[in-house]
Amino acid sequence: MNSRLIRFAVAAAIAAVPMGAGAIGNNEKGCLVGGAVGGVAGHELGSGGHTLLGAAAGCAVGVVVNKERVKKIDAEKRQKQKVARKSYRPDPRDAQASR
Protein backbone atom coordinates (compact mmCIF):
# COMPACT_ATOMS: atom_id res chain seq x y z
CA MET A 1 0.00 0.00 0.00
CA ASN A 2 2.80 2.42 0.89
CA SER A 3 4.49 1.63 -2.43
CA ARG A 4 1.35 2.57 -4.35
CA LEU A 5 1.06 5.84 -2.48
CA ILE A 6 4.64 6.73 -3.32
CA ARG A 7 4.08 5.83 -6.98
CA PHE A 8 0.98 7.98 -7.08
CA ALA A 9 2.79 10.93 -5.49
CA VAL A 10 5.64 10.66 -7.98
CA ALA A 11 3.21 10.40 -10.90
CA ALA A 12 1.29 13.43 -9.67
CA ALA A 13 4.51 15.43 -9.36
CA ILE A 14 5.57 14.43 -12.86
CA ALA A 15 2.14 15.31 -14.22
CA ALA A 16 2.26 18.75 -12.58
CA VAL A 17 5.62 19.74 -14.09
CA PRO A 18 4.34 20.52 -17.61
CA MET A 19 1.80 22.99 -16.27
CA GLY A 20 4.61 25.40 -15.48
CA ALA A 21 6.35 24.99 -18.81
CA GLY A 22 5.83 27.99 -21.03
CA ALA A 23 7.74 26.74 -24.04
CA ILE A 24 5.24 24.07 -25.04
CA GLY A 25 1.78 24.58 -26.48
CA ASN A 26 -1.53 23.91 -24.83
CA ASN A 27 -2.21 20.66 -26.66
CA GLU A 28 1.16 19.29 -25.63
CA LYS A 29 0.58 20.21 -22.00
CA GLY A 30 -2.74 18.40 -21.98
CA CYS A 31 -1.23 15.37 -23.67
CA LEU A 32 1.71 15.18 -21.26
CA VAL A 33 -0.39 15.48 -18.16
CA GLY A 34 -3.12 13.17 -19.41
CA GLY A 35 -0.60 10.66 -20.70
CA ALA A 36 1.24 10.52 -17.39
CA VAL A 37 -1.95 10.05 -15.40
CA GLY A 38 -3.37 7.58 -17.93
CA GLY A 39 -0.16 5.56 -17.98
CA VAL A 40 -0.13 5.20 -14.22
CA ALA A 41 -3.83 4.36 -14.16
CA GLY A 42 -3.43 1.81 -16.95
CA HIS A 43 -0.52 0.20 -15.17
CA GLU A 44 -2.21 0.04 -11.78
CA LEU A 45 -5.73 -0.87 -12.90
CA GLY A 46 -4.87 -3.03 -15.89
CA SER A 47 -2.60 -5.55 -14.18
CA GLY A 48 0.53 -3.83 -15.50
CA GLY A 49 -0.04 -4.66 -19.14
CA HIS A 50 -2.10 -1.67 -20.17
CA THR A 51 0.33 1.15 -19.48
CA LEU A 52 0.65 2.31 -23.10
CA LEU A 53 -3.08 2.01 -23.72
CA GLY A 54 -3.79 4.11 -20.63
CA ALA A 55 -1.18 6.68 -21.66
CA ALA A 56 -2.68 7.00 -25.15
CA ALA A 57 -6.21 7.37 -23.80
CA GLY A 58 -5.00 9.81 -21.15
CA CYS A 59 -3.24 11.89 -23.79
CA ALA A 60 -6.40 12.15 -25.88
CA VAL A 61 -8.55 13.06 -22.89
CA GLY A 62 -5.93 15.53 -21.65
CA VAL A 63 -5.94 17.39 -24.96
CA VAL A 64 -9.73 17.68 -24.98
CA VAL A 65 -9.92 18.79 -21.35
CA ASN A 66 -7.13 21.34 -21.85
CA LYS A 67 -8.83 22.80 -24.93
CA GLU A 68 -12.01 23.32 -22.92
CA ARG A 69 -10.01 24.95 -20.13
CA VAL A 70 -8.33 27.33 -22.59
CA LYS A 71 -11.69 28.21 -24.18
CA LYS A 72 -13.10 29.05 -20.76
CA ILE A 73 -10.12 31.25 -19.88
CA ASP A 74 -10.32 33.06 -23.23
CA ALA A 75 -14.05 33.66 -22.80
CA GLU A 76 -13.46 35.14 -19.35
CA LYS A 77 -10.77 37.45 -20.74
CA ARG A 78 -13.06 38.62 -23.53
CA GLN A 79 -15.84 39.28 -21.04
CA LYS A 80 -13.54 41.33 -18.81
CA GLN A 81 -12.35 43.37 -21.79
CA LYS A 82 -15.93 43.95 -22.90
CA VAL A 83 -16.92 45.19 -19.45
CA ALA A 84 -13.81 47.38 -19.25
CA ARG A 85 -14.62 49.00 -22.61
CA LYS A 86 -18.22 49.69 -21.59
CA SER A 87 -17.23 51.23 -18.27
CA TYR A 88 -14.55 53.51 -19.77
CA ARG A 89 -15.66 57.14 -19.86
CA PRO A 90 -13.17 59.72 -21.04
CA ASP A 91 -12.73 62.73 -18.83
CA PRO A 92 -14.11 65.86 -20.59
CA ARG A 93 -11.31 67.93 -19.04
CA ASP A 94 -8.75 65.93 -21.02
CA ALA A 95 -10.42 66.93 -24.29
CA GLN A 96 -10.41 70.62 -23.29
CA ALA A 97 -6.75 70.54 -22.24
CA SER A 98 -5.62 69.25 -25.62
CA ARG A 99 -7.23 72.16 -27.52
Image: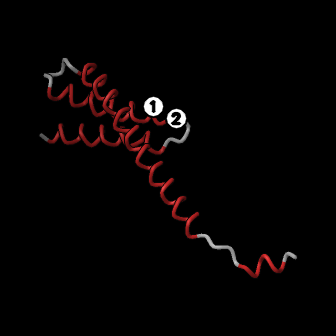
Q: Report, in whole angstroms, how far the alpha carbon at label 1 lies from the one at label 2.
A: 6 Å
The local secondary structure at tag 1 comes to: helix
Q: Nearer the viewer, residue 49 or 66?
A: 66
Amino acid type at mark 2: Ile
The reply, left or right, for residue 49 in relation to residue 90 is left
Above or below 99: residue 10: above
The reply, left or right, for residue 49 in relation to residue 79 is left
Quarter holding residue 29: top left
Q: Position of residue 5 (x, y in %)?
A: 19, 42
In percent of the image, x 58 and y 63: which residue is there? 85
Q: Quadrant of the N terminus?
A: top left
Quarter holding residue 6: top left
Q: Position of residue 37 (x, y in %)?
A: 28, 34
In this view, the residue farthest toward the bottom is: 93
Q: Nearer the viewer, residue 72 or 1?
A: 72
The local secondary structure at tag 2 comes to: loop
Amino acid type at mark 1: Glu
Q: Position of residue 8 (x, y in %)?
A: 24, 39
In percent of the image, x 51 and y 53: which residue is there? 78
Reading the image, the residue beneath label 1 is 28
Instruction: Count how many numbered circles sit on residues in the image.
Output: 2
Q: Quadrant of the C terminus?
A: bottom right
Q: Position of residue 93 (x, y in %)?
A: 76, 82
> Dot 1, how many residues are within 10 Å of its Cα: few (below 14), some (14-19), or many (20+)?
some
Reading the image, the residue beneath label 2 is 24
Above or below 56: residue 97: below
Please say if the residues under marks 1 and 2 sit with CB atoms less than 8 Å apart.
yes
In percent of the image, x 56 and y 37: which residue is there? 23
The tag on residue 65 is none
